[in-house]
């Protein structure tokens, strides 16, 4: 889960960081090399200076020598030495001059480099312009779209980021961290902490707790109902299932098969009958037998989409559910967001369960669903067995992205 998104985000941020650091590193390397040359020349200068001092001392000693004999015997030697020393001194002087010139050039170069380095620093530490933000956001946008985040969520994100980045005192060098921070913040706001379903059911003192599950065909409604029933049963709750998908062929048998596996009762009518009436009967059955929970399975497809919405509205009107749970597939992207949005407008979603998370590498649909419904995702379907229902953990999700 989120592996794909995580990897792509990392690439976007790394690219940004690499651009800055590579250039600065290059300048630092070059400065380092120049410094080495200066140190080397400095050493040479010192050596020559020492040698000059030595020769001067030698000369002074020889000239100050008061010993006549010594002077006499050494006269020619000293004169020669003096000559040699003077020649040497002259040579050293010339050499030193050259070295001093070189040092001067290097100092100049150093200053030049310093200026250049400052310029580079400036380039990466200035404030962010609108164009620069656009350029960066394009990369991020592609990654988010690839990972099934809806356009609406992306636009929201962009607007928020623009406000917090462009024209503020934020430095470019801090941009990747800031973007990550803002993404994380936004994801945290969207992915609400789920409520505890079992607790919620137990809190209801009078009558059965009624849950209606809806969503388009094939998303995993019936399978999820079986998973939820299995989980609630393990928590000691009694359950009855309502076969309110009277439209799709074999839908009732499918639910009955799960019920038989889990040792549960199904309330059913004929195919083509009124799904709201089935729900009504299931609730009456639960009331009469003090059953804790009624789980209503619904159709995912009718003759038209408008028919489907009308039918869901009627089921809701008749059954007055305590919870309306949207079942969405995590593997389909923007389509599902569109569906969720429609269901939310028409019926009102209280919570979502996202199925097939086991085969989804992207995970962006969660963010989109959370954003569109403004309600928590409470579980993830993570496989095809009854136990493959995982409590949704927003913190864990966010950690897995960043
Ligand atoms: N891998 C995986 N498969 C799932 C998951 N949930 C459901 N499925 C599979 O998805 C397919 C459709 O599941 P159903 O429960 O029949 O879906 P539905 O929404 O009731 O479909 P309709 O009744 O036709 O609207 C089945 O093959 C399920 O086994 C899940 O979490 N992971
Ligand atoms: Mg079904």
Image: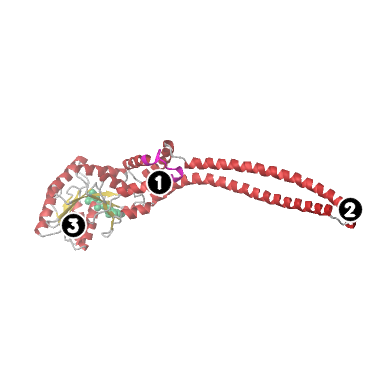
Residue receiving disc 3: 201
Compute the Cα span from label 1 to label 3. 41 Å
Numbered mark located on residue 245 in the image: none
Residue receiving disc 1: 178
Q: Is residue 292 left or right of residue 364?
A: left
User: How far across and down, in percent of the image, does residue 179 sit?
Assistant: 40, 45
Mark 2, residue position = 75
User: Crowdedness of circle 2 by 10 Å Cα count: few (<14), some, many (20+)?
Assistant: some
Residue 202, horizontal then vertical, whole percent:
17, 59
Q: Does residue 304 appear in this view?
A: no
The quarter of the picture where residue 259 lies is: bottom left
Name the image colouring.
secondary structure
Q: Please tell me whether mark 1 or mark 3 is closer to you in this view.
A: 1
Prevailing secondary structure class for the magenta stretch in the rendered image: helix
Going from N to C along the chain, the mark reached first, 2 or 3, is: 2
**Magenta span covers which residues?**
163-178
Apparent side of residue 79 relative to residue 283 in the rendered image (left or right): right
Residue neighbourhood size for the residue with mark 3, other residues' Cα within 10 Å, grouped as few (<14), some (14–19), many (≥20): some
User: Who's the residue at 9% across and 58% down the image?
Assistant: 288
Q: CA distance from mark 2 to mark 3?
A: 119 Å
Respond yes or no on whether mark 3 lies under 8 Å from ligand 1: no
Q: Is residue 177 visible?
A: yes
- In the foreground, 317 or 122: 122
Q: Is residue 169 magenta?
A: yes
Give the CA separation, mark 2 to mark 1.
82 Å
Query: Along the polypeptide, which appears first: circle 1 or circle 3?
Result: 1
- Label 1 Cα neighbours within 10 Å, binned few <14 / some 14-19 / many ≥20: some
Q: Nearer the viewer, residue 73 or 260?
A: 73
């Amino acid at each position: 889960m989120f592996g794909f998104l995580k990897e792509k985000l990392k690439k976007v941020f790394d690219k940004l960081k690499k651009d800055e650091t590579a250039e600065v590193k290059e300048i630092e390397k070059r400065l380092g090399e120049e410094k080495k040359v200066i140190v080397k020349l400095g050493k040479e200068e010192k050596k020559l200076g020492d040698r000059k001092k030595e020769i001067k001392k030698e000369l002074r000693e020889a000239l100050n020598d008061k010993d006549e004999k010594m002077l006499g015997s050494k006269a020619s030697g000293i004169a020669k030495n003096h000559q040699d020393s003077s020649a040497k001194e002259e040579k050293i002087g010339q050499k030193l001059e050259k070295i001093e010139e070189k040092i001067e050039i290097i100092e100049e170069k150093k200053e030049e480099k310093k200026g250049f380095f400052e310029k580079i620093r400036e380039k990466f530490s200035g404030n962010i312009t609108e164009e620069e933000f656009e350029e960066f956001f394009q990369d991020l946008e592609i990654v988010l779209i690839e990972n099934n985040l809806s356009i609406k969520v992306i636009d929201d994100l962009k607007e928020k980021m623009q406000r917090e980045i462009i024209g503020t005192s934020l430095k470019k060098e801090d941009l990747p961290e800031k973007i990550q921070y803002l993404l994380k913040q936004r994801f945290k706001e969207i992915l609400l902490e789920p409520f505890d379903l079992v607790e919620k059911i137990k809190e209801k003192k009078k009558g059965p707790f009624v849950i209606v599950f809806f969503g388009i065909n094939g998303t995993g409604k019936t399978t999820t109902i079986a998973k939820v029933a299995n989980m609630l049963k393990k928590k000691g709750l009694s359950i009855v299932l309502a076969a309110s998908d009277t439209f799709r062929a074999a839908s009732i048998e499918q639910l009955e098969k799960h019920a038989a596996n889990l040792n549960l009762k199904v309330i059913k009518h004929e195919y083509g009958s009124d799904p709201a009436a089935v729900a009504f009967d299931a609730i009456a059955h639960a009331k009469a037998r003090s059953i804790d929970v009624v789980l209503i399975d619904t159709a995912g497809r009718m003759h038209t989409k408008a028919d489907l919405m009308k039918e869901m509205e009627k089921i809701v009107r008749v059954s007055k559910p305590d919870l309306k749970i949207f079942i969405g597939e995590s593997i389909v992207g923007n389509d599902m967001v569109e569906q969720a949005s429609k269901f939310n407008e028409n019926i009102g979603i209280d919570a979502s369960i996202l199925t097939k998370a086991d085969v989804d590498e992207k995970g962006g649909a969660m963010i989109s669903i959370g954003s569109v419904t403004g309600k928590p995702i409470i579980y993830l379907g993570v496989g095809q067995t009854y136990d493959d229902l995982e409590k949704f953990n927003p913190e864990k999700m966010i950690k897995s992205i960043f």
